[in-house]
Amino acid sequence: MNLVQQLINGLVLGSGYALIAIGWTLLLGAARLVNFAHGQLYMLGAFAAWAAMDRLGVSYFLAVPIAVFVLGVLGVLLQLMMLRPVMQQNLTSLMIVTLGFGYVFQGGAARIFGGNPQTFVSPLQSANIRFGEIWFTWQDVVTLVGTLLLFAVLWLVLNRTRTGALVRSVAEDPKLAQLFGINASLVYVGVFVFECAAVALGAGLVAPRSPILASMGFDEVILTFVVVVLGGIGSVGGSLLAGFGLGMFTALFGALVSPAYTTAAAFLLLLAVLLMRPRGLAAR
Amino acid sequence: MKKFATPAALLIAALAYFVPALSGGAPVVYAACTAIAILAVMSYGADLILSYLGEVSLGHTIFWAAGGYAASLLAVNAGWNGWQTAGAAIVVAVVLAGVLGLATLRTREFVFSLVTYAAAVVAMEVTFNWSFLGGSDGVVGVPPLELTIFGKGINGAGDAALWPVAWGLLMLTLLFIQRFRHSRLGTSALMVQMNPDLAQALGVDARAVRFLVFVASAPISALAGWLYAYQRAYVGPDMFESYFLVLMLTAIVIVGRRLLLGPLIGTSLIIVQQTFFSIGGDGDKIVLGAVLAGILLLWPRGLIGLWDALAVSRRSSRPRPSEPTRS
């Protein structure tokens, strides 16, 4: 095992985890909404980009923005449907509702795109960079840089702009924010659209690594659970750190111990942390 | 009126015993009825958590699978009979629920759901990779269920032979749920869910209540899995599939929470649709998911809420049962 190579793998994996988790982190922080359809949204993002390339014949670089747009529109529709329980903060119902949506997406995608695995090809995936024994692809570089940029932009928007202040005030106390004339439902829609668009971007960058399947939903993003909770509920910086930490853990555990039990080990880590800190590492 | 509601509900469930025979005794009817009874019992396990603790357990597939695996492994490898495997299923479920219950003791709401879900993923991965549990192939060749008292009883495999057992298990479950609702634990659980401060003021230990209800719920789903293993003569990692999870939750919310027959009617509606009005596996997924999301978005209290709304619009004087709101 080459340690440097594994560290690079961990960095690449971690940036993917963080990128896929970013939308959910914001959603959880701002709307306290747990979206169990997140995995299926990732799957839909990947299939939207794949369909744009396969059916419309556009290039990869146009297909990803198309997928981001399509998922953003879907996000508006979903949030409008869920607006009543979101405004009431009926979190138990919402969790189950999103689970139902996820199941609909899975069945729907299998009907529209078929049940067979598809290959979603990125031209950057086959462009390697080598330094002796060590290698990575341009796709990895783009994912890493894209993740860091998106996190930086999100952090700046949340903490340095008026829009960010609105989101933070609604997250703090939706009723009080409304008393001050803030349209909380608009903020919720915006946050949800961001989640859908961000996960589509994540799918566009991460999904080309392996074949895509209508049933992949939860399996592919299962580790974002860990990122979101470990990072601390709704903490943007925390989820970036948790993403990279988890990437390193996965790469090293897979190489040193056993690739088959990597997910189980990550969840045992999560359980152990939650036993000590029930609200996550970066909890206030 | 209200006084007779529970005996009437139990009587209706008891009379359901004759449904397959009265409808002609076709194999497909026996299969559907047995499946409904088994899956309803599975749902009652999760119902205890969702209806009475107000939490969403996404980990009850663990107990469902644990019951199935305990039965299969012991029946295949050790030749245990039905009573012995049932006992083992209960013990395994209680132990697993004890561990998971302790691990989630301090978690609430979505953290509880995430952790129970995470536990289910770990359990599936372990099951899939551990050759002791049959790995990805599962355990095949489960012998016919042997369930006898003083030489009399059941020794069978087919759906028609298993129907009395499935029905009996369902009735036992209903009686247990009925007892639970009126037990000290059941009323404490409702109080902890609806007014935690009051519960604390009255000296109710919320954590102990949550832990005990969680542990009590596990053997119910496990016994359903136990019978499912005999019905299919096979168990595999597919018992962890989200189908069962979505089915449990849909069955509970479709009619309305905290109704004795709610999960049974919900399961019946779902299985009847999937058996007799199926539009293909993927189509059925869309139906199941859409029903789950649609019910909660349109009539959050389930179809019973729709019924009340209709009754109110007909200017009936029936008062609306109040729904606990969670903040």
Image (cartoon, rainbow, N blue to C red):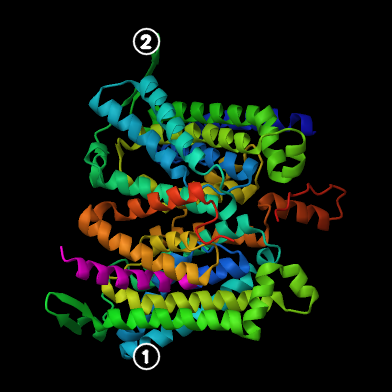
Magenta stretch holds residue A14? yes
Give amino acid for label 1.
Answer: Leu
**Residue B228 visible at all:** no
Separation (CA) of disc 2 from disc 1: 73 Å
| Dominant SS in magenta | helix
Vertical comparison of A87 with A71: above or below? above
Viewer-side residue, A275 vs A226: A275
Magenta stretch holds residue A95? no
Residue identifier under label 2: B151
Vertical comparison of A190 with A42: above or below? below
**Residue A168 visible at all:** yes
- Give me the chain letter of mark 1: A
Looking at the image, the residue that sits furthest to the top is: B150
Q: Where is residue A2 in the image (x, y as percent from the top left)?
A: 16, 66
Viewer-side residue, B57 vs B212: B212
Vertical comparison of A18 with A161: above or below? above
Question: Where on the picture, by quarter, is residue B202?
Answer: top right
Give amino acid for label 2.
Answer: Gly
Q: Residue at x 47, y 46 (%)?
A: B59
Question: Where on the picture, by quarter, is residue A125?
Answer: bottom left
In which quadrant is the N terminus of chain A drawn? bottom left
Element carrying mark 1: helix
Element carrying mark 2: loop
In this picture, residue B259 sits left or right of residue A37: right
Q: Residue at x 79, y 77 (%)?
A: A180
Vertical comparison of A272 with A94: above or below? above
Q: What stretch is highlighted in magenta?
A: A1-22
Q: Which residue is drawn at 45% across and 26% down?
A: B165
- Check contact, mark 2 vs mark 1: CB within 8 A: no
- Give me the chain letter of mark 2: B
Residue identifier under label 1: A62
Q: Position of residue A275 (x, y in %)?
A: 49, 46
